[in-house]
């Protein structure tokens, strides 16, 4: 257990830039840009953009959460979305090289001179990708969402808008942030097969170029062949199936919320709120619908854990990580 | 007390070539063994089998364990320095010490700090900022602070200047080696380690060409400096090798009694490098 902790720490030392600084710097940049544009807007004072929004919120009757308020809530999530994309790109790179790099620079000979099991090593890299990096990104995302909301609230108060009115709109910012935290275990299970696949390719490959060829080009080529076979007829629909469940999974597997691509949105009527922002919506109905939205999305995501896409994913992911451990045991060179 | 390394018929075949072709090896505790051979002879392959970095055929036990199965346990007792470039570039001195201290049960941090204090290394310094010599100093400080029973060195001083090379072996002898430890070293710089070896193994084309203790080597092999007038008599005793130095011929004999050779001229123990050249002379032919 102690060794495993230090293996995780080792990964963090090596990848501090990707795990910590990349999300911190992007989130920081978003917030600074936002503050700068708020300042620019209030100096110019023109009738555009955020200034119109302020006046519309101010005009909405007090005590009734307006949909414009929820727009503000979601704009607070912008840094979080950007951090998610950074996390996605960073994990893709990390998983594709974490079992190649130390063979390329031969430092594997140092790591292997220590009494550390290959299982422990491979698991520490998988856990870094599936837990450490996402948790850091989540914390950075949550902090930046709150900071973003705070700057918006301060800016709003200068336009005569009550902070409470903005903050307590629906969906409640706290509820949305809770959704992000609650999705972490689902995200972990979701990404397992993709992490397994990329790390297996990384353990197998003789160079970083070749990792990419294995990891992406191989499933893409199989998709193309299956599509072609579907045209001839013997296995109708196989290409589409493979595209949706394998090729897309290679990419979406590392994207926070990627499983929503498989979700049937009709099962969550509240999701309609995202589609119709028309002014005629009855405020009370909106309130009921959307306060139910986050719990519904959470329960729906957890139900998806039992669907074949997740269950097979776990099986495939575990097998691939097992193969990566075996390769790690005997392959010390490129 | 069983042997530190015991191998019978150790073999490794790569796709096209035999890297190890049935090696028998016995190494006792408290020895410093030089594993010497030309490029491609199989030295590194043998070390990799001992360190359980590759699969192999045949019988091999290291410290009484089969490296194929008990690798984690084995690596608590075995240390390893490959040539200089294997410490990861990103790691700093303090991180390296911290990590090894926390994953290695036999690591003595105070001892390591003591060794580091004798160098110019500072805690925050990263490997990528160090010269080759400094990297080796760091690696050596880490390894010497581990109370291991077998230390494997694969060309540890490759690319180092002579000051670092001398210091490297001096440190090992003065501060590390004792009768409970065993050192197995491969190098091409035979002359520099000749005086510290207790045993010598020549390896060629995946086979052991010669395995002897340095004491027995002096008994078995003799070099004689012969006057030109007596070269015929010298050749009659079937020397392994003959070379000319300053008009005199130097003959190298295997297993000819000293008494018989003293009649031919001045006798002495051959250097390991001369013996190596004589043994391997047609390797690349």
Image (cartoon, rainbow, N blue to C red):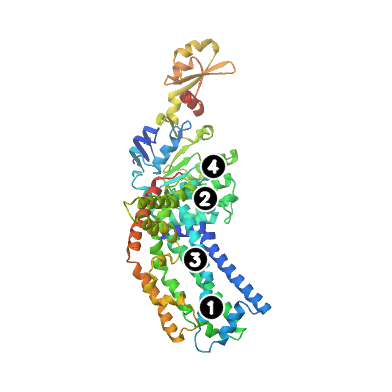
Residue B147: x percent and y percent? 44, 49
Which residue is denoted by mark 2 in the rendering?
B88
- Judging depth in this view, the residue of B53 and B280 nearest the camera is B53
As measured in the structure, the alpha-carbon distance from the residue carrying label 4 to the one carrying label 3 is: 49 Å
Is A308 displayed left or right of A103 in the figure? Answer: left
Whether labels 1 and 3 share one chain: yes
Residue B58: x percent and y percent? 32, 37
**Chain under label 3?**
A
Residue A132 seen by the camera: yes
Q: Look at the numbered disc 1 and give the secondary structure of its residue.
A: helix
- Marks 1/3 in contact by CB < 8 Å: the verdict is no
Circle nearer the N terminus (2, 4): 2
Whether labels 1 and 2 share one chain: no
Residue pictured at 59% horizontal, 82% vertical = A54
Q: Look at the numbered disc 3 and give the secondary structure of its residue.
A: helix
Which residue is denoted by mark 1 in the rendering?
A72
**Chain under label 1?**
A
Q: Look at the numbered disc 4 and give the secondary structure of its residue.
A: helix
- Marks 3/2 in contact by CB < 8 Å: the verdict is no
**Residue B168 badge:** 4
**Chain under label 4?**
B
Which residue is denoted by mark 3 in the rendering?
A84
- Judging depth in this view, the residue of A269 and B246 nearest the camera is A269
Residue B146 seen by the camera: no
């Amino acid at each position: 257990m102690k060794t495993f902790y230090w293996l995780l720490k080792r990964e963090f030392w090596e990848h501090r830039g990707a795990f910590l600084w990349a999300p911190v710097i992007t989130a920081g940049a978003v917030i600074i840009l936002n503050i700068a544009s708020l300042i620019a807007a209030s100096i110019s004072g023109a009738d555009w953009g955020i200034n119109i929004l302020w006046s519309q919120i101010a005009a909405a009757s007090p005590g009734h959460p307006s949909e414009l308020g929820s727009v503000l809530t979601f704009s607070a999530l912008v840094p979080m979305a950007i951090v998610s994309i950074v996390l996605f790109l960073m994990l893709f790179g990390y998983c594709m090289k974490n079992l190649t790099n130390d063979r390329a620079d031969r430092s594997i000979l140092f790591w292997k001179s220590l009494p550390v099991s290959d299982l422990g090593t491979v698991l520490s890299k998988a856990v870094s990708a599936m837990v450490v990096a996402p948790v850091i990104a989540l914390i950075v995302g949550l902090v930046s969402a709150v900071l973003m909301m705070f700057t918006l609230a301060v800016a709003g108060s200068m336009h005569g808008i009550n902070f409470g009115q903005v903050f307590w709109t629906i969906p409640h910012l706290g509820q949305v942030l809770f959704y992000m935290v609650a999705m972490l275990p689902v995200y972990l299970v979701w990404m397992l097969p993709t992490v397994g696949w990329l790390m297996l390719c990384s353990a197998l490959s003789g160079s970083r170029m070749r990792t990419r060829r294995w990891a992406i080009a191989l499933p893409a080529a199989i998709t193309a062949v299956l599509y072609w076979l579907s045209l001839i007829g013997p296995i109708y629909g196989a290409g589409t199936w493979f595209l949706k469940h394998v090729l897309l999974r290679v990419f979406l597997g590392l994207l926070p919320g990627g499983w929503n691509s498989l979700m049937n949105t009709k099962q969550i009527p509240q999701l309609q709120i995202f589609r119709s922002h028309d002014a005629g919506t009855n405020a009370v109905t909106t309130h009921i619908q959307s306060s139910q939205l986050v719990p519904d999305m959470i329960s729906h995501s957890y139900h998806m854990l039992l669907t074949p896409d997740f269950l097979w994913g776990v099986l495939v992911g575990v097998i691939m990580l097992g193969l990566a451990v075996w390769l790690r045991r005997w392959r010390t060179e490129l | 007390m069983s042997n530190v390394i015991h191998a019978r018929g150790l073999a490794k075949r790569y796709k096209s070539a035999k890297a190890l072709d049935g090696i028998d090896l016995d190494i006792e505790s408290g020895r410093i063994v030089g594993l010497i051979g030309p490029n491609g002879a199989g030295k590194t392959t043998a070390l990799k089998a001992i360190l359980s970095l590759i699969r192999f055929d045949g019988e091999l036990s290291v410290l009484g364990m089969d490296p194929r199965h008990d690798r984690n346990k084995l690596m608590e007792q075995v240390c390893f320095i490959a040539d200089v470039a294997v410490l990861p570039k990103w790691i700093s001195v303090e991180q390296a010490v911290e990590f090894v201290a926390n994953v290695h049960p036999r690591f003595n941090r105070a001892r390591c700090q003591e060794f580091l204090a004798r160098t110019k290394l500072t805690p925050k310094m990263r490997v990528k900022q160090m010269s080759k010599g400094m990297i080796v100093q760091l690696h050596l400080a880490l390894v010497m602070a581990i109370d291991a029973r077998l230390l494997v060195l694969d060309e540890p001083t490759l690319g180092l200047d002579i000051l670092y090379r001398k210091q490297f072996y001096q440190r090992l002898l003065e501060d590390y080696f004792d009768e409970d430890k065993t050192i197995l070293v491969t190098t091409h710089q035979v002359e520099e380690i000749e005086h510290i070896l207790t045993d010598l193994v020549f390896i060629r084309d995946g086979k052991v060409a010669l395995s002897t203790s340095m004491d027995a080597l002096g008994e078995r092999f003799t070099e004689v400096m012969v006057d030109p007038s007596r070269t015929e008599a010298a050749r009659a005793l079937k020397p392994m090798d003959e070379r000319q130095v300053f008009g005199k011929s130097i003959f190298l004999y295997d297993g000819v009694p000293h008494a018989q050779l003293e009649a031919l001229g001045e006798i002495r123990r051959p250097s390991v490098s001369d013996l190596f050249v004589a043994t391997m002379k047609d390797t690349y032919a």
